[in-house]
Amino acid sequence: MAEPEGDNCKENSHPNKQKPDGENNCKKSPVKTKDCKNSKQNKDNVTRVVVVALTPDRRRETWNKKVEFLLAVVGFAVDLGNVWRFPYICYQNGGGAFLIPYTIMLIFGGLPLFYMELALGQFHRSGCLTIWKRICPALKGIGYAICLIDIYMGMYYNTIIGWALYYLIASFQSELPWTSCHNAWNTRDCHPVTEIRPNSTSSSPAREFFEREVLEQYKADGLNRMGPIKPALALCVFAVFVLVYFSLWKGVRSTGKAVWITAIAPYVVLIILLARGVSLPGAAEGIRYYLTPKWHKLNNSKVWIDAASQIFFSLGPGFGTLLALSSYNKFNNNCYRDAVLTSSINCLTSFLAGFVIFSVLGYMAHVQHKSIEEVGLEGPGLVFIVYPEAIATMAGSVFWSIIFFLMLITLGLDSTFGGLEAMITALCDEYPKVLGRHREVFVAALLFGIYICALPTTTYGGVYLVNMLNVYGPGLSILFVVFVEAAGVCWLYGTENFARDIEKMIGHKPGIFWRVCWKYISPIFLLSIFIFSLLSHEQMLGTEYEYPDWCFKVGYVLTASSIICIPLYIIYKFAITPGSLVQRWKMIWKAEHSSDNSALTYCGGTEV
């Protein structure tokens, strides 16, 4: 078990230096006897041992200010899903009544896992790979699985931010291009949103701009023939990767500066959009629809599963990000308070976003003389079709469009910072001499590789690939990976050992509530979400496009590719461990470093 760097480490690693016997006599005697030569040789041997013991590892950085860490955690947790998923899930599952299962799942499922990851990262001061030798060496495959999941996320999540950047650039015109139907990409079925369209095949200018100008998906035959790369879209995604690089290349020094903008700006814009939204006609009806409780829906198990899934994916435990960000904290930082504060901010942000979205949906229902059910969409359709549609009808539409898409970009950026930083921290900790000392070059190579892998998502049929990667990349596998992580920490390493580690940091042991949640409730919470998600994964792809059968097989391979890292590493660890079969099996499950530090002292990761 790693202990903090401190004076005790210095004292243990710097023993009193006493000259070997006979050293002074050797210096005084003009004739070097055999004893003197032996004394000199012994001295050299002692010196070499001390030099090896005192050779320092690369010293770990810490956040310049505590607030930078909090902003980074909030920025990671608050992402696009808070805007486009939570409001839809809320009104679909009972409106105000949904807040009851949502809060229960937060308290008993999401928050304990969130707290667990912050505490693990802060105590061990390492990423998702090296941390396992101090908890359960056989489960190091979890770290490799997380790195692979983060690559899948980088392949499609940055593309969505690229779409927002495309919209932002297109907004710098005297009139928004999705206001009218007089553009080259429009069809005969296009009608302005203010007109009543009895024809069911009619479409709005905003929908056609997204589907026929931004994506140009009509040029593709789904995933069977995705078509060539769209250069403008590929360039937007490349610009996103450049922004990400210059936010990550220097570690917490550069990320700490970037989050001041990317974490705070969305709140400024949300408040401005809320003030504008509630002043629109029909907004009150939209908000009433959002909040009106439908108590009978609480009898439906799907509502509770949706609440659990929303909490889990919103807070984001298991992606390695919380481990990485908290590993740069000072050892005695109060991670308990941080966990409660940041998770509460995340959930309140989702609730606030609901007012922003539903005030505008109420306005659009009023303008189009429709019900809110007919207007509303979830996912990308909400922020790339419905909301731009509403903005186009407002006075000062160009201004509202610019700040809205700036908000989407900043929401996405600090979330992608977090996911990629998890992988970068893990690999730099695992290979400090090869990667850690050349972080700038390594980050550049890594991001360039992910960008190349992401290029298929910028083709004409790339939107279908984005949806598929979202479901089968991290969507299913991360649930199983975090279940194994929680089981490794709470069942194999032991809840009591973990609680003692926290006591060393913050001065008091976690209460019985947290220990019960970690040991029993949280693992069951994760396993339940995983099973229900596995049973309904085809529904998660949506109904707008019928995916061919081969896509599901590829999806299973994507999911299995990360999960299989766990058993493969167990086999590898068993094979390389010396001893008999029984000894090896016992040894691979036992932490290499004791939390009581009875045998060894670790100073900044250096074994003394």
Image: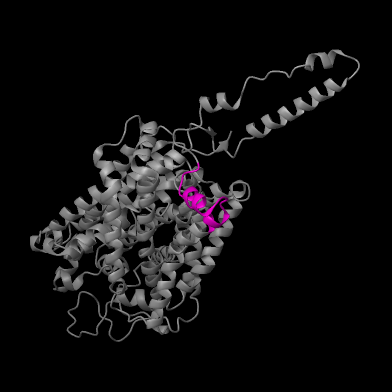
* Residue at the (20%, 86%) spot, across then down: 199
State left or right for residue 39 relative to residue 467: right
Q: Residue furthest right?
A: 31
Residue 248 at x, y percent in the picture: 51, 50
Is 321 included in the stretch rendered in magenta?
no
Q: Is residue 229 visible?
A: yes
Image side of residue 128 versus residue 196, left or right: right
Position of residue 18 relative to residue 444, above or below, is above
List x then y, in percent, for residue 442: 59, 54
At a point 37% along the width and 79% down the height, the residue shown is 212
Residue 95: image quadrant is bottom left
Q: What segment is highlighted magenta in the picture?
A: 572-592
**Residue 2 percent coordinates (x, y):** 48, 37
- Residue 129 appearing in the image: no
In the figure, 54 relative to 518: above or below? Answer: above
Residue 345 appears left or right of 96: right
Q: Residue at x 73, y 19 (%)?
A: 20
Q: Nearer the viewer, residue 299 or 580?
A: 580
Q: Looking at this view, is 181 or 603 the one in front?
A: 603
The percent position of residue 360, horizontal first and vertical second, equals: 21, 62
Number of marks in picture = 0
Principal secondary structure, stretch drawn in magenta: helix
Instruction: Compare residues 62 and 213 and report the one nearer the observer.
Output: 62
Q: In the rendered view, how is the structure colored?
A: one colour
Query: Could you tell me which quadrant the C terminus lies in?
Result: top right
Task: Please state if 504 lies on the left or on the right of 191 as rendered.
Answer: right
Whether 97 is drawn above or below 256: the answer is below
